[in-house]
Amino acid sequence: MAATTSAKPTGPTPVKNKKKSVFQTNNWVDIFLTVVRLVAIGIIGLGFTLFVIQQATGEGLSSEALRNLIVAGIAQGAMYGLIALGYSMVYGVLGFINFAHGEVFMSGAIAGWIVSDTLFKNGLWESNFIVSLLIVLTVSVFVSTAATILMERIAYRPLRESPRLIPLITSIGVSFFMQNAVLGLIGPSSKNFPALPEWLSKKRGFLGIELEGTKLLVLFVAFVSMAGLWFFVERTKTGKAMRAVAEDKEIAALMGINVDRIIITTFAVGGAMAGVAGVLWGLLFRGVSFLTGFLPGIKAFTAAVIGGVGNLGGSMAGGLILGVAESVGPLLILEPLGIPGVSQLKDVVAFSVLVLVLLFKPSGLFGERLSAEDRA
Amino acid sequence: MTVLDPKPLLEFRNINTHYGAVHILKDVDLAIYPGELVCLLGGNASGKSTTLKTLLGMVTPTTGEVVLDGEVVNDKPTSYRVERGITMVPENRRLFKRLSVKENLELGAYLRNDKDGIAEDLERIYGMFPRVKERLSQRAGTLSGGEQQMVAMGRALMSRPRVLLMDEPSMGLAPALVETNFELIQQIHKEGVAIFMVEQNANMALSIADRGWVLQTGKVVLDDTADALLQNQDLRAAYLGQA
Ligand SMILES: Nc1ncnc2c1ncn2[C@@H]1O[C@H](COP(=O)(O)OP(=O)(O)O)[C@@H](O)[C@H]1O
Ligand SMILES: [Mg+2]
């Protein structure tokens, strides 16, 4: 039956043919993808059903534990989101993934450690935490921003006209360079941020939930930064110019926009967000080292792809989704399936989410399909 | 028709351009005077768009001088030239499709800082194109071709140009809109803006123009008044035959 319709040379009913093609596909890749999709839905559905049954019979997680996992996931995800913004913004204006962006985040975290450790030793950290935090944030944001600006000027701008693979590979080189520079500077051991003062880190009620103060602080700072970025991109003249450059550099220049300056501003703003994330990471997990940028960098890139790289709201949402998924996913889906040692499987869950999203919506959850015309 | 100011607003002095090794414009001399409406005709790939881009600094000439208001601007960026009163409605309009109509218009005034003047010009453009006003918050990519053309013109006017370059403004428009479009161009011209227009629709372009040039593989082969060009037998055979 399939053969008869497709062999017909002048099909008078193209609409009908188009509809049928979903079922009549003889493309093995499509069939394979469909099977994989069904299996994925099956596994998740089964795990979740078992989880619900366990909860109902009272042998699962306490609701308190579940809530804590979600909050931890959101805090983690907010940091992924902050980092993801940098990938997304640079991709938006240059169509290029800066793989050294994880190291920008790391440079902010390391700068944050150096400053907070100094402030702790001279006592300001305990006596006036708010001022200390503002100093730490300022220095970290400055360091990360400077790192991205130097990267753009030295490594990427000279390659702007080269084939895309070349700056991409260069960014991997920049990433190694920065890791080794920090290794040389502070050595291989992990350094600890000072603990937060007791009044801040203690648990407190918030919207009816008991929350650790540290997580509240992380969420607050992340939220303020994201809101600030949103305002900058959507409501200021420079933000408008940035969106124009992302869409069409030649015409942006025709409007009188200095395209080079907007590109470097984009890098700088992405770097600033990564700097904030670096400080928050240090406050929440305390330990930072020259390798701190690696996994969060990849996760944030994953978050950007999940949300739709180039789309800022999508990147923030992608970060939150990824953070929550890797926090609750192991216990929600994998544990009920009887898989041992699930808490070690965070990263597996994170990258499985990426694969799943790409299986169902290759342009990301909130991404627009980029036409050839838009992305020449 | 127009009394010509003795000093050209925009000038090419013996311009040559290359894309890589390919020679495009060959010894081109042009002059556009304040308040004129001039059209540039020529077959496909004859270098018309390149001419406009060279005037704006989007393409750098290999030899010769681009002169704006008496000043040689060869090494000045596009933004400098836009600030001095030249802009363009590009081929295919090239709106920022993901930005709102309002934002597109505002970007036209990117180099200006006179808030009141900008607000005034926005109102003027809404008066000219009432349909644009109804669609200010819509993404520009969702507009129809005719509406996009209006926004593209409005965006160009927002820089308060003294000379407006237009690259095939009627391309891609529904036939019914082409005439309206030419009327709009005339209206802009009447407000004192000099217009330098590239058009395939030679008959209609010449009927509203003061003067015209014909470009053939990068060389100016004809340079005359619009009326004379309309009567020119060679040109009629080459470009106006089908019209
Ligand atoms: N950016 C470019 N790089 C290389 N060649 C180009 C470029 N732009 C235009 N050309 C070539 O230059 C010639 C003139 O182009 P153009 O000025 O666009 O012609 P027209 O507008 O008259 O159709 C064409 O052969 C075109 O292929
Ligand atoms: Mg052209």
Image (cartoon, grey):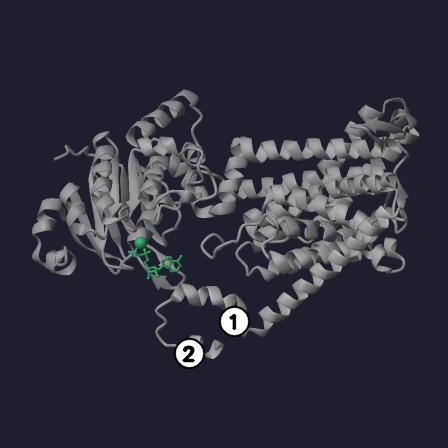
In the picture, measured across the screen, residue B55 lies left or right of residue A100, that is left
User: Which residue bears the numbered disc 2?
Assistant: A7
Does A156 appear above or below A317? Answer: below
Residue at the location (73% across, 51% down)?
A299
Answer whether labels 2 and 1 touch (C-beta < 8 Å).
no
User: Which residue bears the numbered disc 1?
Assistant: A24
Report the chain holding disc 1.
Answer: A
In the picture, measured across the screen, residue A233 lies left or right of residue A333, that is left
**Residue A64 percent location from the top left of the image:** 87, 38
Residue at the location (72% across, 61% down)?
A42
Q: Residues within 10 Å of mark 1 (few under 14, many from 20)?
A: some
Secondary structure under tag 1 reads helix
Frontmost residue, A66 versus A73: A66
**Residue B242 percent location from the top left of the image:** 14, 58
Residue at the location (80% across, 48% down)?
A328
Frontmost residue, A234 versus B194: A234
Type of amino acid under label 2: Ala
**Residue A182 percent location from the top left of the image:** 81, 48
In the picture, measured across the screen, residue B111 lies left or right of residue A155, that is left
**Residue B239 percent location from the top left of the image:** 16, 57
| Residue A185 seen in render | yes
Q: Residue A214, located in which quarter of the rendered image? A: top right
Report the chain holding disc 2.
Answer: A
